[in-house]
Image (cartoon, rainbow, N blue to C red):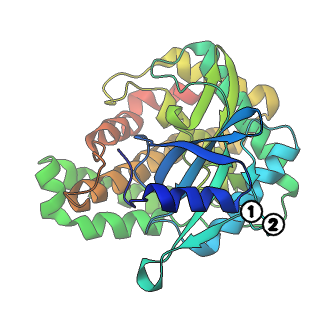
Amino acid sequence: MAVYTRLGAEEMSAIVETFDVGTLISAKGIAEGVSNSNWLIETQHGESARRFILTVYESRTDISDLPFFLDLLDHLAARDCPVPRTMHDRDGASHRFIGEGEGRKALALIEFLPGVSVSEPTAGQARAVGAALAQIHLASADFGQARANSLDLPAWQQLLGDCGAEGLESIHPELGRLVERELGVLAREWPADLPAGVIHADLFPDNVLMLGNKVTGLIDFYFACTDLLAYDVAVTHAAWCFSTDGTQFRPDLSLALTEGYEAVRPLTPAERESLPVLARGAAVRFLATRAYDWLNTPEDALVTPKDPMAFARRLQFYADPANSGIFGA
């Protein structure tokens, strides 16, 4: 379970009270995710029960970034994108703090949206996700705020360097060599002159809520930033178009995802041509964070680190010249 911070019943009730959303009925830790602590909150508000997601932000989230993340949700929701609204407290603030000194952490209460995260997506669902991704790219064009990508190529280099050759080889004997080769390729070939804007940067199936083929919610925007729009397509492709362990590529999902995206926002020729290297970068990004977490997650944390090799396999697939045509470049 992804809960690093423990909150007692009285403390949880006091937190909920500050948001004026009713009386706390229940709070259940949410297993998904590895970066922050999350609970599903249910309250009684008059005659009706209401649900929210309470998030306590852990060390990987820079508190100074919260206004960007939370204001972005409100901006997109106001433009009819399928994203949850931020619940503001009685003073109008989008987030609050708990703890003191070095233990001080921020928290926010987010609207709960209906739907389920799919584990075996269909082509119709992948097409809908592609369209929803393009929708938020267009809707955020007038957002007016920017945030640098804190998990860009230099960050991948740093994270993988911190893992060390010995650490990477403890995950898999060949992983160090693969990482060294691919970081060199990305340093030489990463594009810099493509259309940029606000991107989600983490649109995995567990960050999408669906009812049938309809997207009811895009959630967990805590890696959102300003970067290449096509890189966001590549991230989503890597997240959706393979089996969970990365051993099987799904060409039907790949085609549907890109068709859905381009039905709303057509890619430029330069973006399409760059997708193969952007996809290699997307695979390295998640390989880097997973490898670091694999080697550094505390033993008593209520979370199971995710397998880095699932993205090493994706990386090998994208790097294989025989697969260069999957994006139609």
The N terminus, quarter of image: top left
Position above or below: 113 against 174: above
* Residue 252 x, y percent position in the rendering: 53, 14
Where residue 92 is drawn, which disc sits there?
2
- The picture places residue 42, in percent across and down from the top left corner, at 60, 40
Q: Residue extending furthest bottom?
A: 101
Q: Position of residue 194 (x, y in %)?
A: 70, 54
Q: Are marks 2 and 1 in contact (CB under 8 Å)?
A: yes
Foreground residue among 203 and 55: 55
Q: In which quadrant of the rendered view does residue 91 lie? A: bottom right
Left or right of residue 298, residue 316 in this image = right
Q: Quadrant of the C terminus?
A: top right
Residue placed at 51% from the left, 22% from the top? 118
**Against 75, is 77 above or below?**
above
- Residue 89, numbered circle: 1
Viewer-proximal residue among 188 and 161: 161
- Confirm whether residue 32 shows in the render: yes
Mark 1 element type: loop
Seen from the viewer's position, the closer of residues 247 and 182 is: 247
Q: Amino acid at mark 2?
A: Gly
Give me the residue at 72% from left, 49% from top: 21
Residue 196 visible in this rendered orientation of the protein: no
Left or right: 74 with respect to 309? right
Q: Secondary structure at mark 2?
A: loop
119 with respect to 42 (left or right): left
Specify the amino acid type for callout 1. Asp
Residue visible at 26% across and 41% down in the picture: 309
Q: Is residue 222 above or below residue 279?
A: below
Q: CA distance from mark 2 to mark 1?
A: 5 Å
Q: Circle 1: is it few (<14), some (14-19), or many (20+) Cα within 10 Å?
A: some
Question: Residue 304 occupies which quadrant of the picture?
Answer: top left
| x, y percent for residue 70 | 71, 59
